Amino acid sequence: MQASGPQLDREVSELSVPVPWGEIRGKVWGPDQGCPVLCLHGWADNCGSFNTLIPLLPKECRYVAVDLAGHGRSSHRPPGVFYSLLEYVADVLRVAGALKMRKFSIIGHSMGADIAGMFAALYPEMVDALVFLDSYGFLPTDPKEMYKVLRQGTDEIIQFEKKTQVKKRDYTHEEAAKRLLDANPTLSEQSAHILLERGLVQVEGGFVFSRDLRVNFKNIHRFTLEQSLEMQSRIQASVLVLLAQGGVERRFSEPAQKKFTPALLQNFRDRNHKVVTVPGDHHVHLNDPEVIAPFVTDILQTKVLSLSTKPDHKL
C-alpha cells in the first residue's frame, strides 16, 4: 500500500492497495491517526462521488474513499470473473487489512451501501457506524423472480466472453460529459465533471470511460427479504439511513423491489437506528452535500468520535 504526499499536513492524497489482480485505487482525506471512515461509491461512479461531502464532515476523521474494482482508476477484475456483492465485500476486507483498520465506520452510496450492509453483517466486530446514502443497505429479490435475474446475469457474462474483441468508444471530453448526464439525470453538470476526473482515460482518439463494461451486467448474488432481514439483525454498528425524496425508489430495476422497503426500514427503526428523508435526488450527497452533512456529522460525532480514544488505524 502506498499513499503519495506528505504524511501529516496533506489535505488529500492518492491511495493504492495491491490486490491479486492489480490494485484498488482511491483518495484519502484527514489526519493519519484520525478515526477511519471507509467511503464506498455507487454503481458506475467512483470515489470522486465523495469530493464535495467529505470537506463538510468532522476533521478528526480519516476518510478513505476507494474506486471499487472495475471503476475509476482501480484495476478491472480478471477475465471470466463476475462483479457481484460478495466479491466487493471481500475487497473491503482486503483494503481494511492493507490499511490495518481493525475497526472503522462506512459511508456507502447506493451499491456501496449494499456492500457496506453485507460487510457489517458478516464482520460486525469491525464496524462501529454505518451511513447508507439513498439506499436501504439490502435490496431483496422476489423469490419468484430469482431464477430470471440469475439467468440474465449468467447469460450476459457468457455472451460477453464470446465476443472476440470489445472496443470501447472514443469520446471528446464534452461528448463524455453529455453521455454521463444523459445516463444519470440525477447528476448536476458540476458533479458529472467531478466523476469524469477518475472516470475517463485519455487515448489516441480522445477519451474512453475507465470502468469495466462487465459492471453493467446483473449482479448474480441475490437474497430474499427473509435473508436480508436476518443479515440486518447481525449488524452491531449504529446505522443512519439517509433517503432522498426523489431518490432510489425511482431507480429500482425490478418493480417488485419496492414492496420490500417498508419491512427493511421498520426493521432498522425497531433496532433503534435512524431513518431520515431529505430533499434531493439519488446523488444528493454529491450535488448538494450540505443537505446531508449535518446528519452524517452527528452520527460520527455521537457514535464514533465521542467514544473513541485510540483509533485502530494506521496508514
Image: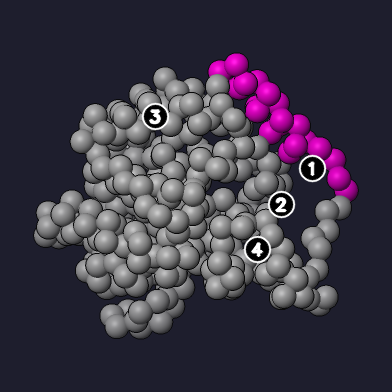
Is any atom of residue 63 visible in this view? no
Q: CA distance from mark 3 to mark 2?
A: 33 Å
Residue 90 numbered mark, or none: none
Amino acid on which the number 1 mark rests in the picture: Phe
Residue 262 numbered mark, or none: 3
* Whole-percent x, y for residue 264 in the image: 38, 30
Q: CA distance from mark 2 to mark 1?
A: 9 Å
Name the residue beneath numbered marker 2.
213
Q: CA distance from mark 1 to mark 3?
A: 37 Å
Cβ–Cβ under 8 Å for marks 2 and 4:
no
Amino acid on which the number 4 mark rests in the picture: Leu
Mark closest to the chain's N terminus, 3 or 2: 2
Q: Is residue 195 above or below residue 296?
A: below
270 left or right, relative to 99: left
Residue at disc 1, secondary structure: helix
Cβ–Cβ under 8 Å for marks 2 and 1:
yes
In front of the other: 3 or 118:
118
Name the residue beneath numbered marker 4.
181
